[in-house]
Amino acid sequence: MSLDPADLALVRGLVEIPSASRDEARAVAWLVERMRDRGFRSEVDAAGNAVGEIGDGPTHVVLLGHIDTVPGIFPVRIEDGELVGRGAVDAKGPLAAFVSAASVRLPGLRVTVVGAVEEESPTSAGARYRATLPAPDHCVVGEPSGWDGLTVAYKGRLVAEVALERAARHGAAPGPTLTEEALAVWERVRAVAAARGGARAFDRLDCRLEGMRAGESDGLAERAWLKVGYRIPPGAAVDEIERELRAAVTAEEGTSATVTRAASEEPVRTERTSALARAFVRAIAEAGGTARTLAKSGTSDMNVLAPVWRCPMVAYGPGDSAYDHTPMERLRLEDHARAIAVLRSVLARLARGDG
């Protein structure tokens, strides 16, 4: 399946504009103009998101993909039928597919496309702002799932910082160094998480040491710092995991330990048999594929929106998530064209009410 030249220009143009998280304004302004050119009522909202609305009617669908990327710029190019560039997969490709698919007006359907800011930051400011608005009838979150896949579950996340401090000691003093104390704390934290078990990888609580500083002293006090990251399966809650972490952080006599939550999102699972999910299954079959339902260990703006809006929701978009955040991020253009066709079919089914 070949990609329409206008749709290629849209996705390539969006990828060519750097938009690392919290520096998305130029890409947002560009996308607002491109949506306006296609007949959307478009604007920059109060959070800095690019927002375009098209059509009118009783059924409202939100297509929300994030416009920000992780840092790291490399030349944007097309090679071997793939668009190479930061954000091509995560997640400007899915966002551009939303705009392309929604450009065809459908009777009875109102579609809002959102290019959300700060998804790659702990704030998720774009999605959190949209979550304060009334819920739509259906929502699709733009994340790479492959043109024939839809994501219905994400693990939650907790990032916590553990700070240890004690009075400065001579290097030859007996007992463990503060660095050794910090490592012992980490081993206890990891053991508690591992004890939860889980038959499948998605059911297990993942716990990783994401950062560490130790051996710091100003001559009066010694300090060490750990950054602990959890991926939390559905069935567990952020507060529950934080309580277990705090119980595991015990220090030697004379050492103080503090735990601070840095970021968090609850795990989420959506209904596989909703009208929206059924519409995707049928649209993918219509395009010659067999739908795959996915559960992912990462997080997305679905973690923010689903608990608040409580409407049928999936995550969908062209691209292989194995390329997320890598220096070889690339999007197969044939798959991008297929995803647009699938999305158009889904929107048509929702407009007719036959998901």
Image (cartoon, grey):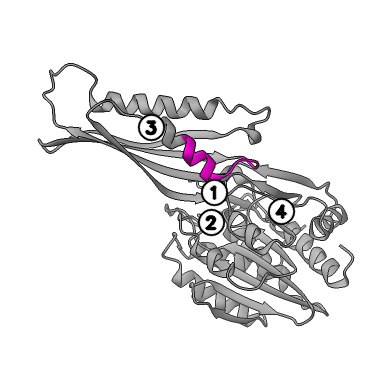
> Mark 2 and mark 3: span between their CA atoms?
38 Å
Residue occupying the point 76% across, 82% down? 56
* Residue 350 location (% of width, % of height): 83, 68
Marks 1 and 3: which is nearer the front?
Answer: 3
Foreground pick, 345 / 128: 128
Foreground pick, 269 / 149: 269
Q: Which residue is mark 2?
A: 87
> Mark 4 and mark 1: span between their CA atoms?
15 Å
> Mark 2 and mark 4: span between their CA atoms?
16 Å
| Callout 2 touching callout 4 (CB < 8 Å) | no
| Callout 1 touching callout 2 (CB < 8 Å) | yes
The secondary structure type at the circle numbered 2 is loop
Verify whether residue 238 appears in magenta. yes
Q: Which residue type does callout 4 highlight?
A: Asp
The span picked out in magenta is 233-244
Q: Which residue is mark 3?
A: 249
Query: Around disc 4, counting alpha carbons within 10 Å, would you say few (fewer than 14), some (14 to 19), or many (20 or more)?
Result: many
Residue occupying the point 55% across, 25% down? 195
Q: Which residue type does callout 2 highlight?
A: Gly
Foreground pick, 89 / 205: 205
Quadrant holding the C terminus: bottom right
* Left/right of residue 184 with respect to residue 292 in the rendered view: left
> Mark 3 and mark 4: span between their CA atoms?
47 Å
Q: Which residue type does callout 3 highlight?
A: Val
| Callout 1 touching callout 3 (CB < 8 Å) | no
Residue occupying the point 21% across, 17% down? 175
Q: First in sequence: mark 2 or mark 3? A: 2
Residue 283 to residue 115: above or below: above
The numbered dot on residue 329 is 1
The numbered dot on residue 5 is none
* Residue 87 location (% of width, % of height): 53, 56
Q: Which residue type does callout 1 highlight?
A: Glu
